[in-house]
C-alpha cells in the first residue's frame, strides 16, 4: 500500500532544490506545493551551495542547459552528496544532443544519484550510450509494451544495479526498479502526452516523496508515479468536452492537491516483478 | 479552404526548435502540442546545432534576449538555413530598445527567414528602422484599421517582397502576405490583448504549420492566424462571468487542442487581396 | 477608500519593467495585464536601460539571481532612480543564501527604493542582517499574529523610516507602512500559500499601482495588497471541490481582471495604525 508515502510528504513538507528548465518550472513548483512539499529554484553557481544546504533533496533536470547552469548543477550535486541529501536526475533530451548526453554522463560519474527518472529513449541513451530520442519525447520504437515487458523490466533492473540508483522509466507502462524489484505501474492516460512537462513535474514530486521517506526510496518513487498517473485519471474525469491540454494540466495538479493516502491506495494500479 | 493545413500538422507532428523568451515559453510549448506539433527548447550555443538539426523548423523570438541566447540564435539560424529548414522571426519589442532592433536586423541580414511575424509597430521598426513601439504592445497610432487597410496591405506586401519572407502582422485585423497576395483576416477578440504571449504562441504554432505544409507557406501561415483568432472566439464563448484573462489563456489553447480542419474551415474569416 | 487607486491603474495603463525570476514570470505578466498595467521583461545589461527608460516603474525580484541579471538589476536601478521612476524591491529568499542577502543589501545601498515588499522573514533578514528564512517561505516563528501585532507594526514603521521606502510585509496579516502610518490588512486566505508566486505577482501589481498613483504611494501599495487578498477570497469562492492550487492560481488573476474600484472598496478589510 503506497498511500502512506504521500501522507509522509504532507507531514514533513520536504524542501526541494530544483535546477530545472525554464519551460515547465512553474508547474514543477506548483505540483511540489500541491503534494505537500516546498520548492526553491536556484541555478547560479555562487548561490546553489547555500540553497541546497537548507533543502532535503536536489532535483536536477537538464531540459534547457547552459554553461552557467551546468556549473551550478555540478556544484549543487557535490554539495548534496556531501550532505547525504536525496538527489534525482531527469535527463531530458539525453540522446538528442551531445551536450545533453555528455552532461548527464558527467553528473552520473560525479555522484551516485538516489533516483534517475526519464522516458525510455532517454534512459537507453544513458545506459547504452545511444538511443533514438525524438526531441524530448520517446521514440515509438523504444516504447515499453506488454509484448516486450519482460525484457524492459530486466533492462531497468540491470541499469539500477549498475548505477546504484532507483530507476524510473515512465511511459504508457511505467517501470520503477532497484536491482531486485520492479514496480510495473498502469496508471495514467495517453492524453497526458499532450501536456508539456508532466515528466518534469513528476521528477520534482518524486524528489519530495523520496526525501520524506528516506528508508523506502523505491516504494516512495513508485508511489509518486502512481499518484501522477492517478491524478491524470482523476483530472481527465473532470474535463468538459471543450477543454483540452491546457486545462488538463491544471486539473492534474489540482488532483494531486486534493489527493490523500487513502485515495492513492484505492487508485494505484501496480504489480511488483 | 485553410482547414487542411491544420490537418497536415496533426498528421506529421512537426518538431519545432524554439529559442524564445522565458515569459511565455510554457504556453508556446503547450500550444505546439495542442495543434499537433512537438516543441523543443534550447538556447545554449553548444546545444543549438544538434537540436535544430533534428527539427523541421526554428522559431526565433527575441522577447528576453541575452548575450548567450543571441549567440545561440545566430548559430541555430545558420544551421537551419544550411539544412533548408523553415525559420520564423518574432521581433518582440523591436523598436523598444537598440539591442532588440539591432539583433533582429542582424538575424535578417544573416539568413532569409521563411516567415516574419509581429505586431504592426515591430514590423514598422524592422521595415523603416523606426517605430513607436510602446513596450511589447503595438502603438495605437500604428494600428491597422478599415480606414488605412489599403496602405497597410501595400506596406506588408512590399516588406515581404524586400525580405523574401511571408510577413504576418497581427492585431485587430491581421495581414499575412507574400509579395503578391495578402490574406486579410478578421478572426479574434479584443480581450486576447489582455493575455500575455498570444503573439508568441502564434509564432510557435505558425512555425509548425509551415513545416507541415512546405509548398504552401503563405496559406499555412494564414491558416495558423485564423486558427488562433478562432480559438480566441471559441475560448471566449466558454468563459463564465467570473473568469478572466488567466482562464481565457487556457481556453484558447484548449480550443486549438480540440480544433480540426472542418472547424477551422467553418470559422475562418478572411479575404485575399 | 482604496478603490480609486485601482481605477487609476486602469485609466493610465502603467508600463512596468520587471527583472524577475523565471519561475513565476508568466503569472506576473498576466496579473499586470489583469489589473490594467502593461508588463515588459528584460534582464540583459545591454538592454535594461533602454527598456526601463520607456517604463514608469521597475520591479526587481531576486528569486532566481544570476551574475548577468544582478548586473542588469544594478544598471536598471541606477537608470530608474536617475529618471525618478517608481522602484520596488522583492527580496525573495533574502536570509536563505549569502548571494541573495548581499544582492538585496547592495541594491538598497545603491538607490532608495520606493517600495520594499517581502514576507516577514525576508524583511527581517534585510533589517537585522539575519533571519530564519525557510527557503522562499516565511518561518512560522517569525509570523505576524494578533499577539505580536503592536511590535510588528513598530518594526515595519521603523524599517520604513530607516530606508525611506514604503514597506509591505505580507502574510496571514499584511502590514503596509511608511514611517508614520501602517495599514493592517486582513484580506486573503491561507490556501494562497499553496500557490507559487502570489508574492511575486503582488510585487508586479503593486509597482503598477504606485506608478499610477505617484502622490499616494502608501495608499496605492495598500490598495494592491487588499486587491490581491480580496482576489484570493473571490477566486476561492468559485473553486469546485475537485479543483486545487493550480486552478486557484488562475481564479485569483481572473478576479483581479474583473475587479473594479467599487468592488475593492466593498471588500477591502483594513485599519490604519
Image (cartoon, coloured by chain):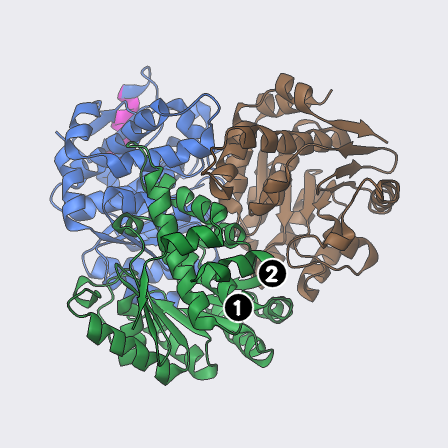
Chain colours: A green, B blue, C brown
- Residue shown at the point (19%, 50%) measured from the top left: B13
Q: Quadrant of residue A93?
A: bottom left
* Quadrant, the N terminus of chain C: top right
- Looking at the picture, how far across and down is residue A91, in whole percent? 37, 69
Of the residues under marks 2 and 1, which one precedes in the sequence?
A: 2
Image marks 2 and 1: residues in contact by CB distance under 8 Å = no
- Looking at the picture, how far across and down is residue B121, in whole percent? 41, 33
What is the magenta segment's predominant secondary structure?
helix
Residue B100 horizontal side relative to residue C122, left or right:
left
Q: Is residue B158 magenta?
A: yes
- Looking at the picture, how far across and down is residue B225, in whole percent? 27, 33
In the displayed structure, C145 sits above or below A45; it is above
Chain ID of residue with mark 2: A
Q: Is residue C227 magenta?
A: no
Residue A129 visible, this angle? no
- Compute the Cα span from label 2 to label 1: 10 Å
SS class of the residue under badge 1?
loop
Chain ID of residue with mark 1: A
- Residue shown at the point (42%, 79%) measured from the top left: A108
Instruction: Give residue C136's mark.
Output: none
- Magenta residues, as a range? B150-159
SS class of the residue under badge 2?
helix
Residue C225 horizontal side relative to residue B236, left or right:
right
Residue at image mark 2: A12
- Which of C228/C84 is in front? C228
Instruction: Give residue A213's mark.
Output: 1
Amino acid at each position: 500500500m503506497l498511500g502512506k508515502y504521500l501522507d509522509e510528504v504532507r507531514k514533513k513538507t520536504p524542501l526541494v532544490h530544483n535546477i530545472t528548465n525554464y519551460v515547465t518550472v512553474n508547474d514543477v513548483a506548483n505540483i511540489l506545493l500541491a503534494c505537500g512539499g516546498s520548492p526553491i529554484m536556484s541555478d547560479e553557481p555562487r548561490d546553489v551551495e547555500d540553497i541546497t544546504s537548507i533543502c532535503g533533496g536536489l532535483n536536477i533536470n537538464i531540459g534547457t542547459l547552459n554553461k552557467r547552469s551546468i556549473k551550478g548543477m555540478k556544484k549543487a550535486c557535490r554539495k548534496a552528496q556531501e550532505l547525504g541529501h536525496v538527489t534525482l536526475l531527469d535527463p531530458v533530451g539525453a540522446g538528442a544532443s551531445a551536450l545533453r548526453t555528455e552532461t548527464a554522463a558527467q553528473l552520473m560519474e560525479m555522484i551516485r544519484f538516489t533516483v534517475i527518472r526519464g522516458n525510455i529513449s532517454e534512459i537507453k541513451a544513458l545506459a547504452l550510450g545511444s538511443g533514438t530520442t525524438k526531441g524530448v519525447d520517446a521514440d515509438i520504437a523504444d516504447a515499453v509494451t506488454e509484448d516486450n515487458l519482460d525484457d524492459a523490466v530486466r533492462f531497468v533492473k540491470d541499469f539500477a544495479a549498475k548505477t546504484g540508483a532507483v530507476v524510473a522509466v515512465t511511459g504508457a507502462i511505467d517501470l520503477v526498479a532497484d536491482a531486485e524489484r520492479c514496480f510495473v505501474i498502469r496508471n495514467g492516460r495517453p492524453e497526458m502526452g499532450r501536456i508539456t512537462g508532466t515528466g518534469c513535474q513528476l521528477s520534482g514530486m518524486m524528489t519530495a516523496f523520496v526525501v520524506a521517506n528516506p528508508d523506502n526510496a523505491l516504494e516512495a518513487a513508485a508511489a509518486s508515479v502512481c499518484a501522477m498517473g492517478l491524478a491524470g485519471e482523476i483530472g481527465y474525469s473532470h474535463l468538459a468536452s471543450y477543454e483540452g491540454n491546457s486545462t488538463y494540466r491544471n486539473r492534474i495538479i489540482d488532483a494531486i492537491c486534493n489527493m490523500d493516502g487513502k485515495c492513492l491506495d484505492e487508485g494505484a494500479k501496480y504489480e511488483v516483478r
